[in-house]
Amino acid sequence: MNNKETEKATEKEKKRIKWHRTFGVTLIDYFTHSNFEVELEKEVSTKTQYLDIAIIRKIEGTPLKEIAVGLESLIEYNLFTYKSLHEALDSWAIEELVGYYSNYRKVISPSLRKLIPTSKFKLYAICTRYPEKLFKQLAPTKVDTGIYEFTWGTRLIRIIVLSQMNQEKRNALWQLFSGNSDGFIFGNKHYDWRCPEEKAALNQLFDLYKQEGGKMSYTMADFTKDFTRDHMHLLSARDRLQGMASCDRLQGMSARDKLQGMAARDRLQGMSARDRLQGMSAHEVVSQFSAKDIKEYLASIENKIEK
């Protein structure tokens, strides 16, 4: 392999890791506070081999009220391989998944003589694109829209095809990774983030769609605007006003609200004497002065007249 080919392979690997990491972080958010936890890139061998995702049942936590299509039958140990927009789910990927399952089972079991029963494991393959070549080889059973199953050796494997998922609220998670702009927009609108700060992951997801040729009518400016609006309450008053012109800060405020908290001296600053006295009667004006000041003022006027 020459240098150019090596650089291309390295760049491809970087993209793969970003896609997987973003998908994994979103799954972590999805199962937050539930009775399942998510492990990412679990090492399953003495040599560097990583299972993409493991979703493990916990004793504590609240079961999800409405779960995404395809995940209804999660059990104790659910192992996933994930193929993004630019990756094909093929027979080699399935062989890897089964191999990772075998190693994972050894790693987490008390010992090789006391392995956790196979009945406690379920294997999944999630892919954005429809795996046409693989399905021609396997002829899987269609369980639901975008959900397929087939047997590989002794293991039943479930395939979740994200680009085929119906646009409904419980599938908002899948729509974010569906590979098309309409799906991304739907997912961004309907997915309820358990940890709102994690939504920043969509910045990277949006860029990945753009890098890989996705037609995104929904622009980054649209996303930034929506994201900022949804998280405005997290900012302090100082942060919200930063960079705004004075006239923009005051827009929509009543005169009373604008003056609230200002000292009288500050309110009158820049106003002429005529403007300051506007609306006041002569009696109200004169009553603010002492008799001595009034006499001195009248005396000065008389002197000016005499001159």
Image: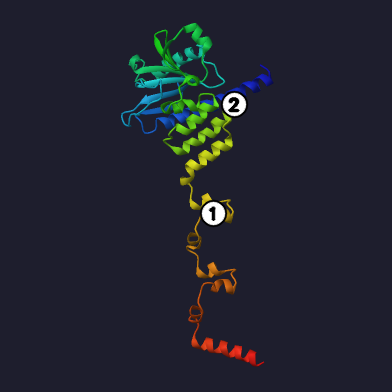
Residue drawn at point x = 59 percent, y = 54 percent: 245
Residue drawn at point x = 48 percent, y = 41 percent: 230
Residue drawn at point x = 51 percent, y = 39 percent: 227
Mark 1: few/some/many CA within 10 Å (<14, 14-19, 20+) = few
Mark 2 or mark 1: name the one nearer the start of the chain: 2
88 relative to 40 in the view: left or right: right
Image height check: is 269 above or below 133? below
Q: Residue 97 or 290: which is nearer the viewer?
A: 290
Q: Pointers 2 and 1 in contact (CB under 8 A)? A: no
Report x, y in % for residue 88: 54, 16
Image height check: is 63 above or below 101? below
The residue wearing badge 1 is 251
Q: Amino acid at mark 1?
A: Gln
Q: Residue 96 or 269: which is nearer the viewer?
A: 269
The numbered mark at residue 215 is: 2
**Which quadrant of the view contains residue 266?**
bottom right
At mark 2, the secondary structure is loop
Quarter that holds the N terminus: top right
Report x, y in % for residue 54: 42, 23
Residue 21 visible somewhere in the drawing: no
At mark 1, the secondary structure is loop
Label 2 vs label 1: CA separation?
Answer: 38 Å
Q: Residue 118 or 301: which is nearer the viewer?
A: 301
The numbered mark at residue 259 is: none
Closer to the observer: label 2 or label 1?
1
Q: Residue 62 or 210: which is nearer the viewer?
A: 210
Q: Amino acid at mark 2?
A: Lys
Report x, y in % for residue 146: 45, 17
Report x, y in % for residue 290: 49, 85
